Image (cartoon, rainbow, N blue to C red):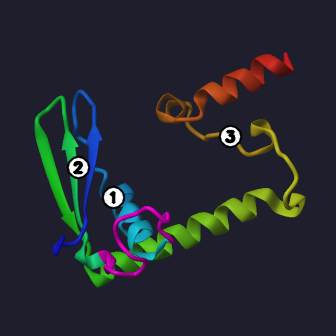
Amino acid sequence: EDHPPLIIDWKVHQSGLKDYWLQLACYALALAQGKPHRDFMIEQNQYQPTEIDCVEVQLLTNQTRSYRLDDADVDAVENYIFSSAMKMLAALGDKGNAVLRPFEFASARNPVQCDYCPFKRMCWEERIWKS
């Protein structure tokens, strides 16, 4: 009870080459700055993101990576979140809150990117739907 939270992110990848620092850093910011559910065990703003330990566990390679943010990391993650939000708003253009379909956005410049995209299924469904 007297220790800051520990975030553990379980990963299942064959190679385990990619690290998930940014994802865990976002989790730490959300935990420290977000509004907790009423049944959550810590109070809002009880801990700073720099106090939260983060561990990435690669189950298939038996590797762990530990992270703890410093003030510069917090600034970098906040800037990343802000710039990502600005890019999303810019992608909407003048359509505002209108419902948009995937093919109304620019496509990947390199087709290899599609192999790693988590939204590939959505694009293929849209492509089939339009045919």
Q: How crowded is mark 3: few (under 14 residues within 10 Å), some or many (20 or more)?
A: few
**Which segment did they paint magenta?**
35-49
- Magenta region, mostly helix, strand or loop? loop
* Amino acid residing under circle 2: Glu
Q: Is residue 63 above or below residue 48?
A: above
Question: On the rendered structure, is 96 left or right of 63?
Answer: right
Q: Is residue 43 magenta?
A: yes
- N-terminal-most mark, 3 or 2: 2
In this figure, which residue is indicated by the disc labeled 2? 56
Q: Do the residues labelled 1 and 3 touch (CB within 8 Å)?
A: no
Give percent across and percent down for residue 70. Answer: 25, 79
Quadrant position of the C terminus in the picture: top right
Q: Count of labels shown?
A: 3
Q: How crowded is mark 1: few (under 14 residues within 10 Å), some or many (20 or more)?
A: many
Give percent across and percent down for residue 88. Answer: 68, 60
In this figure, which residue is indicated by the disc labeled 3? 107
Residue at screen point 17% across, 72% down: 3
Question: On the rendered structure, is 81 left or right of 128?
Answer: left
- N-terminal-most mark, 1 or 3: 1
Give percent across and percent down for residue 72. Answer: 31, 82
Quadrant position of the N terminus in the picture: bottom left
Residue 24's disc number: 1
Q: Residue furthest front?
A: 39
- N-terminal-most mark, 1 or 2: 1
Give percent across and percent down for residue 113. Answer: 51, 36
Q: Does the magenta stretch include residue 75?
A: no
Between 41 and 106, the residue placed more toward the observer is 41
Residue 95 sits in quarter: bottom right
* Amino acid residing under circle 3: Ser
Q: Residues within 10 Å of mark 2 (few under 14, many from 20)?
A: many
Residue at screen point 20% across, 44% down: 57
- Mark 3 or 2: in front is 2
